[in-house]
Amino acid sequence: MTASTTLEQSPIGVGASIINVYTARGSGQPLEIMAYKVGPLGDREVEIKVTHCGICHSDLSMIENEWHMTRYPIVPGHEIIGTVSALGRGVRSLAIGQRVGLGWQSGSCGGCEWCASGKEHLCAQEEWTIVGRNGGWADFVRADARFMVPIPNGIASADAAPLMCAGTTVFSPLAHYGVVSSMRAAVVGMGGLGHLAVQFLAKMGCEVTAISSTHSKEEEARQLGASRFIATKNSDELQRAARSFDFVLVTVSADIPWQDYLGALRPEGTLCLVGIPESDLKVPPFDIILPERRVVGGRAGSPGDAARMLHFAAQHGVRPMIERFKMSDLNTALARVREGKVRYRAVLEN
């Protein structure tokens, strides 16, 4: 995309006057370029010039209105990397030209108990980057400065993009639920989320088992750090792993045999869902009560969680496997993601 914007010599509080975006006007329709006028930045806002943006399955869900909260036209994109192009007058934490990222969350009230404790993602008034506002499939994007996370020098921008959603989605629950190196952990699903979760857990020092339907991804999983592999299709490998794991992270968005996965937990073990099942979860109560197991949810964390995740990824070499596309080839990239042909994350480049 060629930006049609110009920035003043002094970018404080000014920013772009016109922003070009890729927008979906309805479910099933190809995305089209459009331009819209914007006013001055708010005092606490930051504008970034987008250099890279990932394609997440949540973008597809919003485009197709799967969650019944899409307002068309919609500008998706919430794995955003760029450089600061303009600052609101009250922003002191960032500098012009600094490289930053913006993920799923773009705002919160700033005054509740959750915001005060660094858990902005739990704020009742949180704002989502592509819900009711324009996301990062654009040349510029704006958001609250608190949610613009600096990118460490050791991570390339194309690699950083998927970490802003997929990375923090799998890393944050590991931190929130106290995963430590002495634990035996399993990751269900070797896809866009799972291949990152295996890396994070392995670099934390955990004994990691990757779980997939077949053995087709076993070699890759072991290269990423898994020491064991379980294939569930037409086998009893999962049942034979009963009472094996302290922590099981479910990254797939499908209905799976929950009783078997609960049974794979040790006493006091945790089953954590970051994927969204197709149906409501049904589990036998005694499988939770007697062994004192937990079933919990995980999600993209706070800006502080994202910053810690990026630091860990930079320090330990955790990187997504990506396919790169020009922003102008967005519809081609979307088709590949829809068809499940991308291994494992698609990244758009301006």
Image: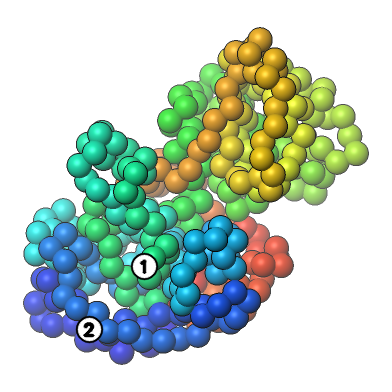
Q: Position of residue 64 (x, y in %)?
A: 59, 68
The residue to which callout 2 is attached is 17
Q: Mark 1 points at which residue?
A: 133
**Above/below status of 72 relative to 54:** below
**Quadrant containing the N terminus in the rendered view:** bottom left
Instruction: Give me the residue at 12% from left, 63% from top.
Output: 43
On the rendered image, what quadrant is the C terminus found in?
bottom left
Q: How many labels does the image show?
A: 2
Q: Which amino acid, mark 1? A: Arg
Image x and y of residue 267, in percent: 63, 13
Residue extending farthest to the front is 68
Q: In this view, does 329 lie above or below 310?
A: below
Mark 1 lies on a secondary structure that is loop
Horizontal side of 208 relative to 174 (left or right) equals: right
Q: Which residue is drawn at 82% across and 37% down?
A: 232
Percent x, y of residue 6 = 22, 86
Q: Which residue is drawn at 24% across and 48% down?
A: 109
Residue displayed at 65% across by 18% down? 288
Where is residue 125? Give x, y as percent: 32, 48
Taking the view exactly as shown, the residue that stands out farthest to the top is: 290
- Compared across the picture, whether 60 is left or right of 338 comes to left
